[in-house]
Image: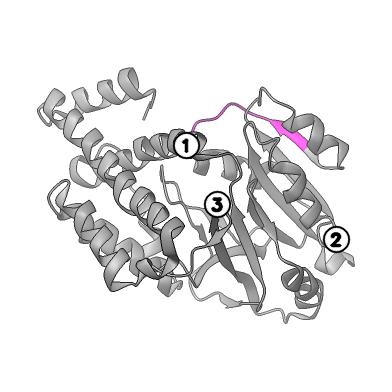
Amino acid sequence: MNRESSLIVVVLTHNEEVHIERCIRSLQTIASRIFIVDSFSADNTVEIAKSLGAEVKQRKWKNYADQFQWGLDNCGADSEWVMRMDADEYLEPDLLEELPQALSDVNDEITGFYIRRKVFFYGKWIRHGGFYPHTLLRIWRNGQGRIEQRWMDEHILLPTGSKTEMPKGHLVDDNLKGITFWINKHNSYASREMVDLLNNKYDLLERDDSLKENDDPQAKWKRILKDDVYSKLPLALRSTLYFIYRYFLRLGFLDGSKGFVWHFMQGYWYRMLVDVKIMEIEEKSGGDVKEIRRILYEDHGIKL
């Protein structure tokens, strides 16, 4: 790739030795540099990444948005394009074929590229329940994108009026670590999601509502529904209604037996867990903001 179309990729890691080689190898033909921002992994993540030519920086973890923005600010300042990847993701061959030419031939008005994502669960492509097509802004001109400052479900934001394109190819999200890891990870996600939902109700910290003014219709609509509709519904009822909507109205049942496990765990169990955590904090704190902050720190290790 020439300088005008140089692409750097930023990947956040923590104990990702199972995935990191697959991720890096899928990027090597299109990336001029691959940066790993590692939160002090205890396994062989760093060694594997370095052996494959990736550049590794280590930094203490606060949350995803904080860590990724640090990566944007400190990695690959001389590149034309930036790409965001997770360690358990990889690019399919059709996307690998498309991207080099797309980045080289794109006109100056284009600021970013949306990528279609496939989610796999135990080898099953989750095609229903609203999970496909799921488009995400994953490539943007260096200096044009920033990440939303939220505790969960963070999106990359471009300046208002930015023009984008979308290749035909896909990236794949396929976690190989098993259900125990998945549960532990989503327990952590639930605590982060809890912060954003509590913040909607109690104004614990300044909210980043930039996505609601953004030009991404899919992400914007989902965020408005989440913040202005879902968050106002009664605890527990909302997770039940969401599962019914996703599994029956959005045809999640067509994903088969593995799909049922996925939609139940990710669409119901996880969201019920978020609500139980909120219920517990509200009962302990009585709705007092200072008490909520204290409980978040002492019980969940979250310092606002």
- Label 3 packing within 10 angstroms: few (<14), some (14-19), many (20+): some
Callout 3 secondary element: loop
State how far apart marks 1 and 3 are (Cα). 16 Å
Q: Is the magenta stretch mostly helix, strand or loop?
A: loop
Q: Give the range drawn in magenta.
A: 56-63
Callout 2 secondary element: loop
Label 2 or label 1, whichever lies nearer to me, is 1
Left/right placement of residue 290 relative to residue 146 reads left
The residue drawn where x is 42% and y is 34% is 188
Residue 76 visible somewhere in the drawing: no
Callout 1 secondary element: helix
Label 1 or label 3, whichever lies nearer to me, is 3
Q: Mark 1 points at which residue?
A: 185
State how far apart marks 2 and 3 are (Cα). 27 Å
Pick whichever, 294 or 178, lies toward us. 178
Point out residue 214 in the picture as x, y percentages from the top left corner: 43, 68
Q: Name the residue under label 3.
A: 122
Q: Earlier in the sequence, mark 2 or mark 3?
A: 2
Q: Which amino acid does label 1 sit on?
A: Lys
Q: In which quarter of the image is residue 302?
A: top left
Q: Which amino acid does label 3 sit on?
A: Tyr
Label 2 or label 3, whichever lies nearer to me, is 3
- Label 2 packing within 10 angstroms: few (<14), some (14-19), many (20+): few
The residue drawn where x is 58% and y is 47% is 175
Q: Quadrant of residue 47?
A: top right
The residue drawn where x is 36% and y is 30% is 304
Q: Name the residue under label 2.
A: 29
Up the image or down, 3 lies above or below 233; here it is: below
Residue 216 visible somewhere in the drawing: yes
Point out residue 253 in the picture as x, y percentages from the top left corner: 36, 67
